[in-house]
Image (spheres, helix red, strand yellow):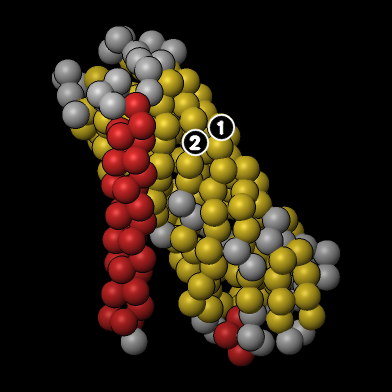
Amino acid sequence: MNNMNNMNKLTSLASWLATIALTFSMISSSFAQTGDIVIRTTVITASTHASSKTLGLDVGNATSVAVDGTYFVTPNIGINVLATFLNTEVKAKSLGSLGSVDLLPPIFTVQYHFAPEGQIRPYAGLGFNYNHFYHYSGTLKSVNAKIDDKVGFVAQLGLDYMLSKTLSLNADLKYLDVRPDVKTTLGNDKLNLRATIFGVGLGYRF
């Protein structure tokens, strides 16, 4: 069963990597050869705070690996797409742990890079993400829980430290706000979910 779940996660991640490749292919065809592409691999930690009025739900923190790419439309403006998957615990105030749920949260942001030629290259970004919840376990599965897919708001701050002309060390902080509906046999609710996602990794500029 665990092997099947892992295969499903890898398949899902592969599909999002394909989406990234297709997105940059479309962007490249639209803007021709106007900018560089940076591909990064990062370790991310999502620190979450969640609440709901009816069921008193909360969501635990999660750590995972992410892959993202930035296409530079100009030296200062980049379009970033990030793919990852998260497994997080869901709790209720009166019942404790309800099990876990998997989440695919692809993130799309438009970034402004303040010092594109410097060794230290800070940036800020705004955008959105699409949250797909799936594979419920524990009590969540028993009560037929369903968290609706939802689009959320994303704000971003980060920097690249250039180790060479092509290799960089990246640190990135994102704030995510999403409010999906929750349906269970115990009742329905709305989950107010806010997450701070911190990532550190390496990037390569093509």
- The residue closer to the viewer here, 125 or 23, is 23
Report the quarter where the N terminus lies: bottom left
Cβ atoms at labels 2 and 1 below 8 Å apart? yes
- The residue closer to the viewer here, 51 or 145, is 145
Q: Residue at x 83, y 64 (%)?
A: 53
Q: Which residue is mark 2?
A: 109
Q: Image check: 1 left or right of 53?
A: left
Label 2: few (<14), some (14–19) or many (≥20) C-alpha neighbours in 10 Å: many
Looking at marks 2 and 1 on the same chain, the residue that comes earlier in the sequence is marked by 2
Which mark, by number, is residue 126? 1
Per the image, label 2 sits on a secondary structure element best described as strand
Q: Quadrant of residue 149?
A: bottom right
Per the image, label 1 sits on a secondary structure element best described as strand
Report the quarter where the C terminus lies: top left
Q: Image check: 206 left or right of 193?
A: left
Tag 2: residue type?
Thr
Q: Position of residue 165 (x, y in %)?
A: 17, 18
Q: Position of residue 141 (x, y in %)?
A: 58, 85
